[in-house]
Amino acid sequence: FAWKSIKDYQDIKFELFEGIAKITINRPEVYNAFRPETNMELIEAMDIARERQDIRVIVLTGEGDKAFCSGGDQNVKGKGGYVGKDGVPRLNVLDLHKRIRSMPKPVIAMVNGYAIGGGHVLHVVCDLTIASDNARFGQTGPKVGSFDGGFGSSYLARHVGQKKAREIWFLCEQYTAEEAEKMGMVNKVVPLAELEATTVAWCRTIMKRSPMAVRMIKRGLNAELDGQTGIMEMAGDATLMFYLMEEAQEGKNAFLEKRDPDFDKYPKFP
Ligand code: 1HA
């Protein structure tokens, strides 16, 4: 596939092909572990992908054939978070989770190897996961002095059930791609050589569907778990659709024309 760079970064690659944005964590020497700068770049790329009209689907992956992402970079873990070049400790991968969750376009994890710790949470947060047969999945928090009680546990439990989620977190074992698929946290497993082609094929199918319908389904599925924030995001999209109706335009036009709005002419659906 003829991926074209959208923007150059230090820790990630950000590329486009057809309507697909591919974001690749590019730190293979640490199995694509993230440091604060990595997350800042990922967040910026997600924001650009959200805005751009020529992007319909986002694919998140890791460089090489060893790892998707191995979580927070243990070399820079300090007191209070992962320490960036500015000396400030941060847990800013949580801001990335929020971006993926709120993204009005599907985000697909293309898992090409280890998805471990905070790297496992990243695939959990994505809308879909397509994995290569060499991929391995697992949490490590309670083994290495961390935990993610946010989406990394509650949303995981929605995928695999409460008992399995507790097993994954309490034992910190690794699971094969096949086991992860059986558990319901992976959509499809393919040989590594077919991973990208399969992912692009899935993206192409999604891009044939109605973007607004896909967006509203994502909002609806999120809302159940995301409380007030989930309802707010779904309501925001309802407002967006209302603004597309003549009835909403009439309210604004009447205000600008200093007259009473005439809403009687619009249909009242039963
Ligand atoms: O829990 C959170 C958060 C919670 C709340 C809010 C924010 C959070 C943000 C982050 C996190 C976390 O991510 S905690 C979990 C951190 N990650 C880990 O515990 C995974 C550590 N890595 C491993 O367990 C293993 O490396 C592995 C299962 C992925 C692969 O094992 P393998 O095949 O035996 O390879 P290994 O030799 O261990 O790793 C290859 C190279 O990659 C090593 O470097 P080298 O000795 O060749 O120079 C290894 O040090 C490096 N590497 C792997 N993972 C990391 C790493 N370097 C830094 N950080 C890593 N996470």
Image (tube, rainbow, N blue to C red):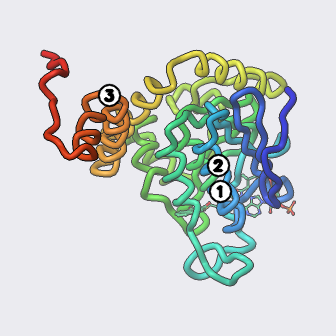
- Considering the numbered disc 1 on the image, is that residue within a helix, a strand or a loop? helix
Circles 1 and 2 in contact, beta carbons < 8 Å: yes
Left or right: 192 in relation to 116: right
Q: Which residue is mark 1?
A: 44
Is residue 161 shown above or below 255? above
Q: Which residue is mark 2?
A: 48
- Classify the position of ligand 1 by quadrant: top left, top right, bottom left or bottom right: bottom right
Please provide percent x and percent y for residue 122.
59, 48
Residue 245, label in figure: 3
Q: Amino acid at mark 1?
A: Glu
Give the quarter of the figure containing the C terminus: top left
Select label 3 or label 1 by which is in front. 3
Closer-to-camera residue (40/148): 40
Please provide percent x and percent y for residue 83.
67, 77
Label 3 and label 2: CA atoms lie apart by: 28 Å
Residue 29 seen in the figure: yes
